[in-house]
Image (tube, helix red, strand yellow):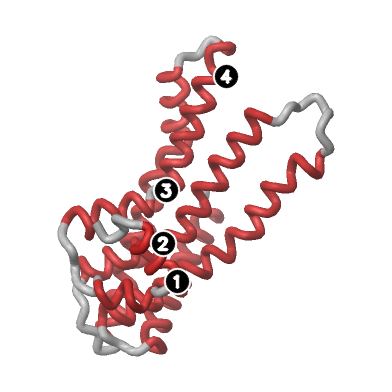
Amino acid sequence: MLLGSAAALRELLFHAEVFFGRNADFKGPFAGVIVPALIVLLGGIGTLLGSLLTAILISPSYGYSVTDSLGRTLEMAGFFSFVYPVLIWVLASFVMYGVSRLLSGSGTLPATIQNVGYGIFPAGFGFFVMIIGSVVMGLTIPNDGSIPFYIVVAPSVFLSMLFPVLVIWSIILWVQAISYTHRISLGNALIAVGASVIIIFLVNLGGLAFG
């Protein structure tokens, strides 16, 4: 497992060139697919855990069972929590792979998918924290006006402001990942990542337009 220790995680986040230099090749189904997939699905896992927590604490008072509440959550948010992130991960990986190959890259598609998944960690973890934090605050902060509104919303505002920074951090990790996976310069890796970011933006824009 590539992130089997705190040292490996610290290496990914703060010394990406070392992490991806060591893991430029595909590491097999577990470390190369399952672990990156769990990283990609951190937001969905957070949604599911938040729903479970809410269901346990609140649903009985409304006559719903825990199973009913989880079912409703998956029905309403299952696609965007679990399917959509995987589709974006695969799409981004294919674009980065294709552009890298055009720029004389030599990495494989499985290795690209693996390392793009690992690069998502800052944004994925940030989204996980935002979801869990929102659920916990909603369940624990009284809504009787005893706590000033600005104190109630301050954590959410802070996390919302921090999230774009984490997205940029993930993009920086992607550049390192593509550079080492495909043995190309950071400039060429930036082109590959930039093309992927533009396409993801257009896909999301199209989803908003037709959603």
Find numbered disc 2 in the image and state the secondary structure of the residue it sits on: loop
- Residue at mark 1 to residue at mark 2: CA–CA distance: 14 Å
- Position of residue 23 measured from the top left corner of the image (x, y, whole percent): 24, 71
Give the quadrant of residue 173.
Answer: bottom left
- Residue at mark 4 to residue at mark 3: CA–CA distance: 24 Å
Residue annotated with mark 4: 58
Query: On residue 120, which mark appears?
Result: 2
Residue annotated with mark 3: 42
* Tag 1 and tag 3, C-beta contact below 8 Å: no
Query: On residue 208, which mark appears?
Result: none
Kindly identify the residue that appears in the image at 27 percent across and 64 percent down. 114
Question: Which amino acid, by three-letter code, is at mark 4?
Answer: Ile
How many neighbours does mark 4 have within 10 angstroms: few (below 14), some (14-19), or many (20 or more)?
some
- Residue at mark 2 to residue at mark 4: CA–CA distance: 33 Å
How many neighbours does mark 2 have within 10 angstroms: few (below 14), some (14-19), or many (20 or more)?
many
Kindly identify the residue that appears in the image at 52 percent across and 64 percent down. 167
How many neighbours does mark 3 have within 10 angstroms: few (below 14), some (14-19), or many (20 or more)?
many
Q: Is residue 134 above or below residue 194?
A: above
